[in-house]
Amino acid sequence: MTVAATPAEVAAALARQPAARALMRRHRLRWWEALPWLAALLYYFAFPDYLGFGSELLITILFALSLDLALGYAGIITLGHAAFFGTGAYTVGMLAFYGVWSEPITSLLLAALAAGIVGLLSGLVLLRTRGLTLLMLTLCTMALLEEAANMGHAYTGGFDGLPSLDIAPVFGVFEFNPLYPNTQYLYTLGVLLVCFAFLRTLVSSPFGQSLTGIRENLLRMHAIGAPVRRRLVVCYTISAAIAGIAGGLWAQTNAYVNLSALGLDRAATVLIILILGGYGRLYGAFVGAVVYLALEHFLAQIYPTAWQLGLGLLLVAIALFARNGILGLGEVLWQRLRFGRAKP
Amino acid sequence: MDFAANFANILLGGLSAGTVLFIVSVGLSVTMGLMGFVNLAHGAFAMFGGYIIVLAMNDAGFGFAVSLALGFIGTAALSVVLEQFLYRRLYRGGELDQVLFTIGLIFIFMATITIVVGPGSQPLQLPPALNGQLNLGFTQYRTYSIFLIVVGFLIVAGIWLAFERTRIGAQIRATVDNRNMAESLGINVDRLFTITFAFGSGMAGLGGGLGAEFLGLDPQYALKYLVYFLIAVSVGGLGSVVGVYYASLLLGVLDFVLELYLPKGGTIFIYALTILLLLWRPQGLFGRKAT
Amino acid sequence: MATPSLWARQAVTATRLETRALTRHFGALMAVQQIDFKLDAGARHALIGPNGAGKTTFVNLLTGVLSPSGGRVLLKGRDITAMAQAERVKLGIARTFQINRLFRGLSVLENVCIPVAERVGAAGSMFYPTGRCTDIIAESMALLEALKLADAAHHRVSELPYGRQRLVELAITLGLKPAVLLLDEPAAGVPSAESHIILDAIEALPKDIAVLIIEHDMDLVFRFAERVTVMVGGAIFAEGTPHEIEANPQVRAVYLGQAGQRTSHG
């Protein structure tokens, strides 16, 4: 090659090859990606009496997205992600309760910082291990934080938590009203949008691709000289920070924080939600959260035991037949429709 | 004089609690060491067996020993059925699938028991021979607790002997050590696993019943103590019966001591110690170092 | 048959890889004993020996997967004995595995983009989409074309026949532009109908790379190697051209008498 091609010429030449073209266009926004956000806005106008549930849904989506980064993309299997949700929640909660700081957006940043630090420290230490040991350690870390919050009940309110948090208005104008959660909903939606945009950029980047590589074949990543542990720790820290934002939002929209932010219950539920929707796809968090919370809302109150039984059966079915969740099934169906019967 | 009695009380209390933990967890340790399968539903098997034992005694009027036998056999039988039809399909699956599957099983067990038996706690009525106190010379202690400690010791001794002296024990040890090698030597690993899984689950059921007296027995049991079983197994070392024995006793005594002197939040130390230990030795105290 | 006359030799052949008294034992088992080994730029060197001879252990020592009990490893004159695997890759040594280690759920193109991105240092960037890294994609496509994999570039690796998967394994390693390439039984498991694609690919490797290939298949050794080292029981048993080795009566005894001398090795 004697004359160096310009980047535009290179790109044009590549675009003629289908594989390269697909890769080059993968990060571009598709038209249907606007749908969830439109639906969320529509929800605001269509169901003004259910905005509390709506906020909870949006927060759950954000929490599930944070887990998707760690578990879906990097393959870090954790049952302790509520540790970061709780750290964020308590950061916001304690700052507001003790009158130290109640501006919502900066409080969220502080929540992200606190959760990120916990994520960084625990990641540096835990991500040296794998498999059952790692799972155990994530559980123990979360349980340890939960016990600490319980022990420090003088500060954290213990089991009863910190009620009636006073959150300052957003931008100084939009007030949080517990009876009319309009501000909460739109505020949460805004935060979710920003965080989602950030995550989407991250997973389309070479960094995101290397995380997928780590998940797909760890030994190969070592063998090509990738700084695996560093990548995992960075990923885990970011994931923790975003979980912390979700926790902070939870405290703000409910004006309340208690130990349930840190429990195994919460951690297991978000894992189930992500798997249900389909991990490693970002949008699985949306689908899983909507399906799970809708079912829970309608079934769990009326028939709690049947709900538990049904959930158990669903999980067993997913583990055996549909490991990639609803979106995974959707992809298989789409392939069948487009290309007919499965490949030889 | 008082100190000795106090110390003995704590020690005996801790050891009996640890023994129950061991009896439940030993199956989990061996099956995880053998197959590498993350069976979070192990506690649910313990719960199931516990319910069989308690109901057999309270409702059906069977004797203590008979009920224990029923609990062991019933749980073992159920585990074989589940293993053949469900667990088997996930051996090659990833860890995530196994975690999901076993969490699902936990929910199914919990809900089924709530529906069939009811949500309340089931008390275990001890046979009169085991009720009351035993005079040990320097102190008196609950007969049942002494009974548990002795039984636990007999079980670990029995299992250890079986591992060391019987052919099947040798096969199990070989497979835990190097599965591929064991298979190429002609050991039927699949059948071995079914047998071990059945035995381990039966043990869990037995432990669930034996421990019902102070651990309680309600539909939440499967989740409540899951972390403890996992800690006992990880700290002891997967596949090591002796390891899970020591780890369980240690955990039992530690928990007892903390319960007395740091009732609010002593468990923090247990979690912190587990984290530190697993960081220093990820394979546990007696486990094999991963190649 | 080796064809040395077709390969342009450099005026000075630089020693790319060297080991001095490299040793590794596992307890009482001496897996690798006092190996002195040299690999020059442009070399086409085969390492053969019976099962359990220590060949894979040797390669693991070279790449940093195992640390030696004694001796030194030098890459381009630099002592890398204490270096971790990832660092060594950065310095220019790469390997393929006997059993494929691929990103099975990803496309062939992505499989190659990942190591290329790693090499050029772009793999850590978080805010720039992969799709815009046209230089990486272009280089990856060129590499796939050279290996005749371009038509499969958009397929998932798991969809490819085994022979072509083996080729992807090679492509990943070449994406690292290594100075030293270690191929661990590259034709292993490939159906004989497909094995020619592997052989053609090896033959077409860039002339400058120092290549060490572990093999059992003597046809492949003859076709490709200029020099052969025979390893037995963890030590170098014989070294020479393929013809010399084939004619060596002691080597024949080792291979024919292999059934009685098999050492098992974990």
Image: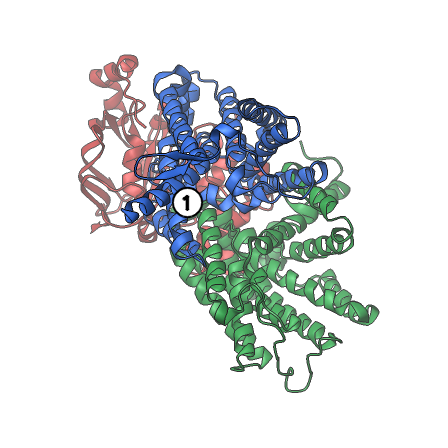
Chain colours: A green, B blue, C red
Task: Where is residue C80? Give x, y as percent.
Answer: 24, 49
* Element marked by disc 1: helix
Tell how many labels.
1
Q: Is residue B181 left or right of residue B203?
A: left
Task: Where is residue C147? Give x, y as percent.
Answer: 49, 41
Reading the image, the residue beneath label 1 is C173
Q: Is residue C231 left or right of residue A77?
A: left
Given residues A195 and C101, the one toward you in this image is: A195
The quadrant the C terminus of chain B occupies is top left
Give above or below for B274 relative to A44. above
Task: Where is residue B44? Give x, y as percent.
Answer: 58, 37
Q: Residue at x 77, y 51 (%)?
A: A299
Task: Where is residue A69? Give x, y as percent.
Answer: 55, 57
Q: Residue at x 29, y 24 (%)?
A: C49
Residue situated furthest right in the rendering: A46
Residue situated furthest bottom in the rendering: A172
- The answer to whether residue C100 is seen in the rendering is no
Given residues B170 and A43, the one toward you in this image is: B170
Q: Residue at x 51, y 38 (%)?
A: B38
Q: Residue at x 69, y 37 (%)?
A: B117
Kindly indicate the quadrant of the structure image that contains residue A321.
top right
Given residues C49 and A193, the one toward you in this image is: A193
Given residues B194 and C4, the one toward you in this image is: B194
Residues packed near mark 1 inside 10 Å, few (<14), some (14 to 19) or many (20 plus): many
Give above or below for B25 relative to B187. below
* Chain of the residue displaying label 1: C
- The answer to whether residue C40 is seen in the rendering is yes
The amino acid type of the residue labelled 1 equals Thr
Q: Is residue C224 left or right of residue B196?
A: left
Give above or below for B166 relative to B175. above
